Image: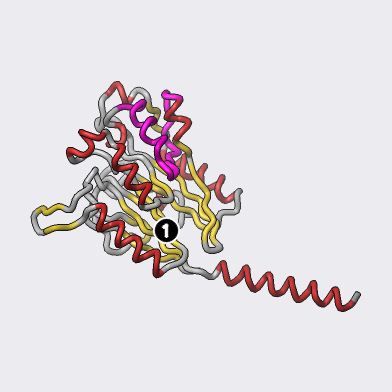
Amino acid sequence: MKNIIKLLFSFLIFSVLMIATVVAQPLVIMHTNDTHSQIDPYSYKDDVNVGGYLRREAAIREVRAENPYTLLLDAGDFSQGTPYFNFFKGYMEVRLMNAMHYDAATLGNHEFDNGCAALAARLKTADFPVVCANYQFANKKLAKVIKPYVVIERGGHKIGIFGLGVNLDGYIAPQIVREVTYLDPVETARKMVAELKAQNCDLIVCLSHLGVDTMTKDNDIVIARQVPEIDVIVGGHTHEELKEPIVVGNTRVCQMTNRGKCFGVLTIQN
């Protein structure tokens, strides 16, 4: 009996050590925003032959090959901006994001350019969850496909990811705006943090399309200050190229330019 107890005790110690080893693994978050249907490489002003989905996919593969635990996230406006969107109605972008194995994305204002019914139809083809917590949709099909948050377990982390969208007034046609109710992003973020903490998430990520323009009422800096329990805000909308995250308390705010010129890489260490 003593031998059995010793074996069980040894097994428990070994199990705890294994769990500790898993928890200690770094997590690499790759992130994009405002890629705007830029499928091909492009040149603009000082940017010569940059971007393109094939180049991005190759770079993502390299990061994944070097890091066993990664996330690939998008902060919205992956639609609209080139003839690819006009001809293929946004389906090509989703298909290519599927091929790159995105883990989650949120909505930008341009996702709504063809209306809520069209958006619901093409997001049904996505292999990745699309999250947005501060919109309520009149379109039942869109309400079904958009989730407020998703929880992903990777490398010993339990990661809660929720989305926040920009106020759509002035960005899309009024008849489409009427189908979407905009909820206060600060209050929504607080509710999401409480829900994700209740699910024992140890890392909370907000995918935001509010932007970092501090002249606007709702922006990522305000969210970081008002909801300090958020660990990382992966942002978009204002097309900022933040070579280093903006640090607000313990929250890191990230954003990486537009049109897929490059993507951000953030390593989370325990």
The picture quadrant where one finds residue 21 is bottom right
- 166 in relation to 172, above or below: below
**Residue count near mark 1 (Cα–Cα under 10 Å), binned few <14, some 14–19, many ≥20:** many
Q: Which residue lies at the image location 69% right of the left edge and 74% below the top edge?
A: 14
Residue 182 painted magenta: no
- 130 in relation to 256, above or below: above
Q: Position of residue 186 (x, y in %)?
A: 43, 42
The answer to whether residue 47 shows anywhere in this view is no
Secondary element at tag 1: strand
Part of the protein shown in magenta: 115-140
Q: Which residue lies at the image location 24% right of the left edge and 30% below the top edge?
A: 170
In the rendered image, the quadrant that contains the N terminus is bottom right
Which residue of the protein is positioned furthest toward the left in this rendering? Answer: 45
- 91 in relation to 236, above or below: above
Coloring basis for residues: secondary structure
For residue 198, side relative to residue 253 (left or right)? right
Please name whichever residue, 48 or 168, is drawn nearer the observer in this view of the structure: 48
- Which amino acid does the dot numbered 1 rest on? Thr
For residue 104, side relative to residue 155 (left or right)? left
The picture quadrant where one finds residue 254 is bottom left
Q: Which residue lies at the image location 27% right of the left edge and 59% below the top edge?
A: 242
The picture quadrant where one finds residue 57 is bottom left
Q: Position of residue 215 (x, y in %)?
A: 26, 45
Q: Which residue lies at the image location 45% right of the left edge and 38% below the top edge?
A: 133
Please name whichever residue, 216 or 138, is drawn nearer the observer in this view of the structure: 138
Q: Position of residue 201 (x, y in %)?
A: 56, 54
For mark 1, what is the residue?
A: 251
Residue 136 painted magenta: yes
Q: Position of residue 209 (x, y in %)?
A: 33, 44
